[in-house]
Amino acid sequence: MSGCPPSQKTVKTRSITLLLGELQENFAMALGAVMAHKLRSALTLLGVLVGVFSIIAVMTAMRVMQGRIESEISQLGSQTFMIRKWPAIFFSLPEGIEKIRRRKNFTLDLCQQFQKKATLARNVGIQSYFWAGEIQSTRARTAPEVQLLGETPGSFAARNWSLAEGRILAETDVENARDVCVLGHNLATNLFPVVSGVGERVKVDGINYTVVGVLESQGTSLGGDQDNFAVIPITTGLNRYGGARWRTLNLLVQAPDQAGYEPCREQAEGILRAVRKVPPGEPDDFEILSNDSMVAQFNAFTLAVRLGVALISSIALLAAGVGIMNIMLVSVTERTREIGIRRAIGAKKRNIMAQFIIEAVLLCELGGVIGVALGVLGGNLAAWLLKFPPTVPFDWVVLGLAICSVVGIVFGTYPAWKAANLDPIESLRYE
Amino acid sequence: MNFLTELREGLSISWSAIRANKLRSVLTTLGIIIGIVTVTLMGTAIEGLHQSFLKTISFIGADVLYVQIEDWGPHSRLEWVNMQKRRAITVEQAATLASELTAARAVAPVMTSRERIRFRKRSASNVQIVGSTEDFFLTGGVSVAAGRFFSASEAAGGRPVCVIGSLVATNLFPNESPLGERIKIDQQPFEVVGVLEKLGTFLDTSIDNQAIIPLPQLIAGFENTHNLDQIQVKVKAGADLDDARDELHSVMRKIRHLAPADADDFAINQQDQILEMVHKVTGTIATIGLFITGLSLCVGGIGIMNIMFVSVAERTREIGVRKAIGAKRRTILLQFLIEAATICLIGGLVGLGIAWPVTLLMQRFLPAALSLSTIGVALLVSLVTGVLSGIFPAWRAARMNPVDALRNE
Amino acid sequence: MSLIRLENISRRYQMGGETIHALREVSLDIQRGEYVAIMGPSGSGKSTLMNLIGCLDTPTAGRYELNGVSVSEMGDNQLAEIRNREIGFIFQTFNLLPRADALRNVELPLIYSGKPAAERRRIALEVLAGVGLADRVHHKPNEMSGGQRQRVAVARALANRPSLLLADEPTGNLDSKTGREILALFDELFQKGHTIIVVTHEEAVARNARRIIRILDGLIASDERMDGRESKVEGQKTGADGRAVPAPDGTAP
């Protein structure tokens, strides 16, 4: 070596090299120690494996179900919001539910008043659901469980329904409660496999309707279900299926664009408060739902459940950590002599500590990797059994592996500290 | 050496081993404690959930049969739609049933509607209005808190009297007694003759938001139909429920003119069916919940197995000596098995001790109580965990070659 | 009838890929009441021979009769019983249970032979008194000197009135003075009629016995009796005055 003192940069590089070297050395030692006691290491990492598996499997399963439910909820168009009496999801005491039940219904009259006043909206639709028996055409009959949607012309745009053939419902259809209908794509194909359904007659619960249009396939993640419906004028539906007194209708409001969403929404709220005579200062006696709000509501609802589940499933990891501490303490005692020798050769306390902590972390990570893999498999297996689409919750995978390291560090600290603080002389004497 | 002696010997060895290394024993036991605490709490919570479900449906009388178009059981969309198409159950059928059924103590036709009730300036909206006869008092699972139920003559003659539920009473008469007052059910006047006891909720509906009026009144004033929602039949005390159900079944078939080959076009429901559904739901929750918490117990067991292997290795010499002095394999096996089991039992007891006050806290939300059976199961589970975790290390100890073992260290 | 009869005993075992012949075709007779030393360098097979005699191990070939009973084909449990009732081991490193006191250590073989608690205690106290440790009965091994520990080990070996005392380098971990004390104790026991086999590599220790069997490379190299002091009578031990000598607790063996 030359007589010149090392430069700042060289010193830094050297200490980094030293650190890396030390890390590598520690890692090699840790691996050696793990392999020296195969059964012991296997059982220790098995504990971590089970702990991590517990968390990851549960979280994966929850994520899968959440995804499925979210896709079910997100059926509205992007600029559309729904106004109605009932909230999307309610989880409250029965008294709360009773309060909602007592709200004034959304009658046809009310909805039509709103429709006249909602000037900022591009489209307003009025909607209700009916269930029909089977629908027959001259060629075929459907399965006896077809959903009938009672709508107005504005619904079509609000729902992002595009037309394949014919026309959508017209105002006159609604005004006159005509017996006309627009078929969903799959329904149309079932009933009229060869010719176009437009202009044909179908029998719904014994009544003849004329098909005036067919919709394009909606192709949502739920597949064909979405296209197995028929749309009739809401007035026709109310007349046929009754319930004018107890039914509450849904308002579908489509804003003109992104910028116009908020003003449209505010106007809608104002109109309804006025028409429903809600006193100022009182909260709305109706709900405004959009895809985002419903998803957010669902997530808020499940948050408590998800936290609880995460907590419970992480308890297994806690037990694994305890096991790690126990075994590491044994390991430290067994290697007292070795520690004494290392100290005699010049290892500092922090070197010894680092060595044992890295060993603990290595064991945890080994168990963690396998546990994460099995957990993702397990969670998706549960999902597959319930016919939900599979997911890989990458955020939980990363989190899980990180948690493993944390467990290793937390529960390895005390044994490592004990090892580092052994008296070197006594350690060398240890038999 | 008989089993009892072996047990005692094993216990004393375990005890000295546990005391020898206190920190290790504490950590080992801690793993089991964590597992037992979570499993016990989960089990108690699920039991509490089950109880609260049962409480909720308890207002459906165990001895009441419900004749309706729909079946309470789970069914597909298709089945439901078909059921809706069935012929209605009518007032006349109910009357015939009442006269022909021998096993019944009371037969009540039930029709419902939803109306707003007003009293002076106050109103209660969406109140369930039940039209029935005086028998509803026996079949409907209600009891009177104040006043009385209406009489047979009032029921038959259709006097405008009513019995209101506790929630309606609270809403319309916060400060005074409702008895004798005139309320307006959708503009029609009724006199309150009785107030029901608070019943609570069924699923998400408050049963207390109802008013009961004579059936003829409901028909005349509101529904204008003879189609009933259901017929409630209360079985005579001491009568066999299944026999009564059979009789009800055949009488209804006769009343509805069903030929022997025809399928039933009505349903007879009873509490059992809902109980079944409740059991299924809680069963599923229990399986999942106990599986997850069982994993933590599993981890505790793995920890014990690990430490027992270490313990066996550390005492190789001692095992050799014992064998040299004449201990059989079985003795060594039992010694270590008992040690593992003892640690687990101690962990189980401590775990129960920790879980118990938490279950007391739980009682604020659920009717959860640490039942004797849960305690028994927890202790049994501890014991089994101990045996399962200890068996491999103990087996290894028992099979040691004494010569090698003595040479050790 | 000999107490111990070995006929063409061999012991082979596999180490790695090789076969080690620890003992080859050894035949031996030892009578009741003899005081024998088995000598040899390390690797000679003396430890293997001791393990076989002590029923800790079974021979690969040959026949071993202990007290007229063939033990060479016995199963593990049976061997354990034999060790319990017929053999008393004394080890170089004492091998006492570290967490138990002297009384408990001596009671151990009695526990395994199924004796009730009261009787166990009585016998153990008696035997401990016999080796001069009546005042150390409740001391743990780490509270005793090396010599005292070995005495406890001897007491333990005597507890079940075994036919044979088997000592493996009994003075190896003791200083010379204490070692002599222990050998004097062995002498005492020999006088009382016990059969003693000592395995050692020290000439001085072997000289105390009345018969020295030397082993080399798995075979018996020599078998000398020290003539003079004691005569051999089959089945019973006679003292210098020619009368039968009672066993430690007063009854004949």
Image: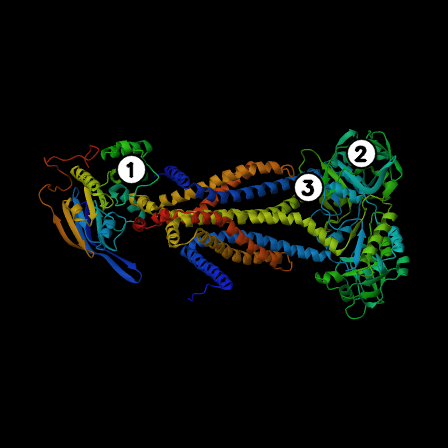
Residue topped by disc 1: C144
Q: Residue at x 61, y 53 (%)?
A: A59
Q: Quadrant of residue C16?
A: bottom left
Instruction: Classify A142 as above or below C74.
Output: below
Residue topped by disc 2: B169
Q: How far apart are marks 1 and 3 (CA)?
A: 77 Å
Q: How far apart are marks 2 and 3 (CA)?
A: 28 Å
* Image marks 1 and 3: residues in contact by CB distance under 8 Å: no
Residue B75: x percent and y percent?
Answer: 70, 51
Q: Mark 2 lies on which chain?
A: B
Residue B240: x percent and y percent?
Answer: 66, 37
Q: Which mark is residue B271?
A: 3
Amino acid tagged 1: Met
Q: Quadrant of residue B101?
A: top right
Instruction: Classify B120 as above or below A335.
Output: above
Work out whether disc 2 and disc 1 sit on a shared chain. no
Please name the colour scheme applied to the rendered image: rainbow
Q: Which mark is residue B213?
A: none
